[in-house]
Amino acid sequence: MTKQAFSVLIAGGGSTYTPGIVLTLLNQLERFPIKTLKFYDNDGERQQVIADACAIIIKERAPQIEFLATTDPETAFSDVDFVMAQIRVGKYAMRSLDEKIPLKHGVVGQETTGPGGIAYGLRSIPGVIELVDYMERYSPNAWMLNYSNPAAIVAEATRRLRPNSKIINICDMPIDIMDRMAKIVGLKDRNDLVFRYYGLNHFGWWTDIRDQQGRDLMPEIKAYVAKNGYWLGGDYDAQTEASWARTFKAAADVYALDPTTLPNTYLKYYLYPQAVLAHADPTYTRTDEVRAHREAYVFSECRRVVQNGTAKDITYTGDEHSTYIVDLCTAIAFDTKQRMLAIIPSAGAVANLDPTAMVEVPVLFGANGPERLAMGNAATFQKGLITEQNCVEKLVVDAYIERSYTKLWEAMSLCKIVPDAAVAKVILDEMIVANRDYWPELA
Ligand code: NAD
Ligand code: G6P
Ligand code: MN
């Protein structure tokens, strides 16, 4: 029997991750057949560079797929089954300010955590809601898998503002870490692991990891992480940049605080902000590194493909980021009930947390979306941290909905990364000016 073929839209077609997703889709057509692939972006010029290269890749590898790139929402969102969303509202120019403004005031400046993440959140909410509304208008039966950050705040916003929409917010960080864990214990990849995990996005812990035969892998992974964090080195990390190397290694210090679990790398920003600041250069932040490396590489490779008129020698493959989103679509499309991570309302998934908290937990993925698995209680340390951080995320969404300056100031002051409400106010006031083209006006 031939499998049904699907129509996929990549929203944020101009993203640096788009070629990787396309290559993975083309590699996995037997598992997840597609008949149409579309790109949508509100920056047509940026998207066109990627689209011109992808048109050549598709023509060479799967000419039967109908491909188009557009800035018109109706053309993009009509007749699709899956929307893979990955927009960056304000692009790298605004990410740079998210990182640099806090640093000026001695506070960690980071894409998805602290004041930078809050600023990005207020920009992303209307952008992602707009995508959801386009999908519901033009393809009401479609599913959206959303990578657009900051996923924690976006997830809380979509829960509140579009509670019935078919959007699932996802993250590749635990996926990347689980691929590393598999290597540590000599297994192939994350799919060889059976795991328990709970927390918020970029704010969670593994409590149990086993192989498919039920053997407990935690002791071996913990012993490794205590010494090396999640850093593997060698060929595996040959392309890993300096800032990510520090982050993977820093997991050893985060682990030391609670040796009963294994942590997400992002916890370092909350638990060791001084160490992060010690390495920070306020004039050259992660955005500058990304622009010099990933963005420059992706766009120059795409331009080279177009110039040569062929993608036969492309140096590029998909990675855990692209395989994960394709795995999710496959699980929904074929009702596989695969156990995967997603960001969903807790509703008891973590028993002693606010049931409305958007938690990141394993779920069974099938045709009706995610089905919760119960992770039990959060331990006291985790419960305290999660409760505080979740209130920060809820206050940001309150601030957005109520257009409230005070709520946003409270969010920044409550955030563990910001040590002082007066400092929070200085940062907030500067961010309001910087984000005037994106944020709602706050009263
Ligand atoms: P990028 O700037 O290269 O790409 C983002 C694209 O979105 C740009 O082409 C931009 O023009 C477009 N865009 C911005 N606002 C838009 C809007 N309102 N409508 C349509 N298009 C819009 O960024 P990137 O580094 O490739 O990252 C893309 C996104 O994926 C970011 O949000 C990033 O944080 C996120 N991301 C998330 C995860 C995760 O774990 N959840 C992992 C990687 C990347
Ligand atoms: C991980 C996280 C993403 C984040 C990305 C940042 O993949 O899960 O949420 O966007 O790192 O990476 P970058 O290379 O852009 O700093
Ligand atoms: Mn993430």
Image (cartoon, helix red, strand yellow):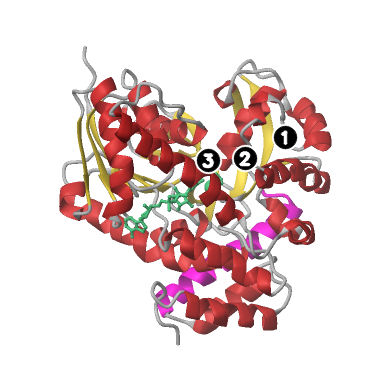
Residue nearest the observer in this picture, 77 or 436: 436
Label 2 packing within 10 angstroms: few (<14), some (14-19), many (20+): many
Residue 419 shows in the view: yes
Q: Residue furthest bottom?
A: 443
Region in magenta: 377-402
Q: Position of residue 234 (x, y in %)?
A: 71, 26
387 to 337, vertically: above or below: below
Question: Which comes before the other along the chain, label 2 or label 1?
Answer: 2
Q: Position of residue 6 (x, y in %)?
A: 23, 31
| Rendered image: mark on residue 231 | 1
Q: Is residue 387 magenta?
A: yes
Q: Residue furthest top?
A: 1
Question: Which comes before the other along the chain, label 1 or label 3?
Answer: 3
Quadrant in which the N terminus is drawn: top left
| Amino acid marked by disc 3 | Asp
* Residue drawn at the location 47% of the way across and 63% of the way down: 93
Kindly identify which residue carries mark 2: 197
Q: Position of residue 232 (x, y in %)?
A: 71, 30
Q: Position of residue 204 (x, y in %)?
A: 64, 47
Kindly identify which residue carries mark 3: 172
